[in-house]
Amino acid sequence: MPQFKRLSSGAGGGVQRARSGGFRPSIILLLLFSFLAALAFIAARSARNDEQKGAMDVSNKKVLDWREQLALESMKSVLTKEVIDSISASKNELGPWSLDLFRRNHVSSSWIIEGLDDQQKNASSIDSSQTASDAEQKTSLTKSEKNTSAGDFKRTDEGKQDDTDGHQPVDTPAKLARRQLREKRREKRAMELVQQDEEALIRLENAAIERSKSVDSAVLGKYSIWRRDNENENPDSTVRLMRDQMIMARVYSIIAKTRNKHDLYQELQTRLKECQRAVGEANADADLHHSAPERMKAMGQALSKARQELYDCKAVTQRLRTMLQSADEQVRSLKKQSTFLSQLAAKTIPNGIHCLSMRLTIAYYLLPPEKRKFPRSENLENPNLYHYALFSDNVLAASVVVNSTIMNAKEPEKHVFHLVTDKLNYGAMNMWFLLNPPGKATIHVENVDDFKWLNSSYCPVLRQLESAAMKEYYFKADHPTTLSAGSSNLKYRNPKYLSMLNHLRFYLPEVYPKLDKILFLDDDIVVQKDLTPLWLVDLKGKVNGAVETCGESFHRFDKYLNFSNPHIARNFDPNACGWAYGMNMFDLKEWKRKDITGIYHRWQNLNEDRVLWKLGTLPPGLLTFYKLTHPLDKSWHVLGLGYNPSIDRSEIDNAAVVHYNGNMKPWLELAMTRYRHYWTKYIKYDHPYIRNCNLND
């Protein structure tokens, strides 16, 4: 224990000696060495990080260089060399292209980029503002280039310096290259536009030259001779010249009145009245008044004076355009009147045919009853013969149908004609065929009023005609039927739509109960070939054999029927092909089996208020025989001779039957001359009755 204490006291004494200054330099060196070691460690670590970052930058640069090179290689086939050079020149300035770079430099300040925080949005807005400022500076620079020397490129922004050091920056070579490229594109586009303008002017000049070749210029001594035919010495040259003078006189008189040239206005009006009296209704020079040459000369002098004082190209053009529009309106009005008159003419019976019917009727009722019978009445119900159904109130038209059929038949004795007419024409029809029998063929005439089964309780049409609404529609006086109105409904108020002769075609089995087949013919047709092969046509279970009339878009069901009505839209195809009444082969056995008359009655009852179709027999025929019509060869039946002036003549000559459907019936004065001879060659104009009624070819 005493030894231990000595040791402790000895150690403590050593420490005390060190604190007192004996060991102080060693401690300072140790601390300095530790600090230097820490600095060396930090410096080494920083150098290592810089080396790694440099390696990554090199690697990224290689990747970017590879991508840029691939993109440029693929764009060489699309872009021009100038564009690629510009891109290469701007690469060092702009750095690698990226979406962030595009957003910062090109996106409008009004765009909002999703996914950016407020700081990034503010930065983007600042970048966009800076980009807009740069664009303004570039625009200002481009404008200033015109007034500065080459190479002295300066940018201004509302008179302020861009750089803080007081020096204005000079454009880089990349910007100069881009500017030059833009200027080249502008020059190229300008050259193209100029070339296009020159080509357009050349085309206009050539067209004007071609037009001028067909237009004669004005000749001294005449006024406004702009038509070639006025230069020719033809019988109408003076008339045409005077009419042209009157047109220009009207134009200049209006201009003179608006400019308070009262003396010139009165002179033009006087000359205009003189020329109107001289021309009158003349269509040729021979019809002109003897004072016409003097009037024409005086008018020419007045027009020359008016031209010197009043000529204004714009004013004359406006007045001529106004006159043209007025003439166009007059033409449209005249067309409406022409339509009205054609419909009116189609409803009427010429005086000659009316005279023929009256004279024949008187002669018939003067005959003894025993002489009013036709021979061979036993053939009327023989199903082995060729039977025809003809319903007409026109004696002359019915005679053409019968005569043309018999004259072209190979075996006339096997043909039987069943004619049905009304009470008014019953005597005339009988008398005509008693006086002019159809050779060895059989003929029989009946009166539709004798069919007692055809009454309003059985027939919907008769019941509808007796209704007050139908009577008001047809006979009320307040319907527009004047020439100025040109009523579109006049067509459907034709008396033939009220006649049961027109609807009797839906009751053929009732009229001829013992026949198997019958050929229905309209009275406005002409037969040109033997029709007996029609009885050999296999209808394949269908009821009606007819020629289809639809083309690409016309004469289909939607032309005749109201497809806005659910009854029509639900049961029929609007594009189904229509067919023609006028020459129809009907299988009466199939008719009875399929109850065709019942189908007709059903649709006629549904159309009592005329919402499914207007009037006529073709629309209900299309409904009644829908999917029950067998199409015949078109050469059997050619239509349109009553309205179509452009039918090919070879088509007419090769047809078995030609049909004058339309308003221009061959027995009317408005018939087309080019088609009328097909009909008139079957009329005996030397017949006493025809000659006495002044029915001329």
Image (cartoon, grey):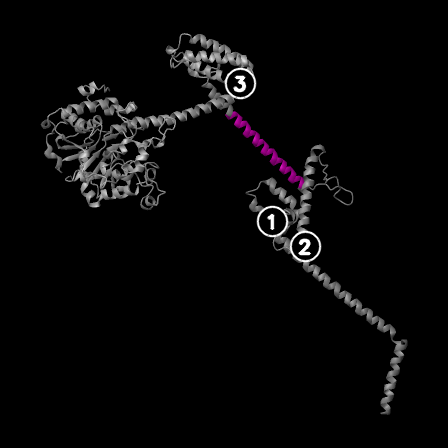
Q: Pointer 3 and pointer 2: residues touching (CB < 8 Å)? A: no
Q: Which residue is mark 2?
A: 119
Tell me where residue 208 appears, x and y as whole percent: 49, 22
Q: CA distance from mark 2 to mark 1?
A: 31 Å
Tell me which label, 3 or 2, sits earlier in the chain.
Answer: 2
Tell me where residue 639 appears, x and y as whole percent: 28, 31
Q: Is residue 303 visible?
A: no
Quarter of the image for residue 679 reads top left
User: In the image, which disc is placed on residue 68?
Assistant: 1
Q: CA distance from mark 3 to mark 2?
A: 75 Å
Q: Which residue is mark 3?
A: 255
Tell me where residue 292 appears, x and y as whole percent: 42, 9
Q: Which of the image's four quarters has the C terminus?
A: top left
Which residue shows up at 38% across the image and 28% down it? 485
Magenta-colored stretch includes residue 278:
no
Tell me which label, 3 or 1, sits earlier in the chain.
Answer: 1
Q: Is residue 9 left or right of residue 355?
A: right
Q: What is the residue that sits farthest to the bottom in this orientation?
A: 1
Q: Which of the image's four quarters has the N terminus?
A: bottom right
User: In the image, which disc is placed on residue 530?
Assistant: none
Relative to 169, residue 486 above or below: above
Quarter of the image for residue 46 reads bottom right
Residue range highlighted in magenta:
175-203
Which residue shows up at 89% across the image and 79% down it? 17
Quarter of the image for residue 449 reads top left
Indicate the secondary structure of the residue bearing disc 2. Answer: helix
Relative to 243, residue 564 above or below: below
Q: Pointer 3 and pointer 1: residues touching (CB < 8 Å)? A: no
Mark 2: amino acid: Gln
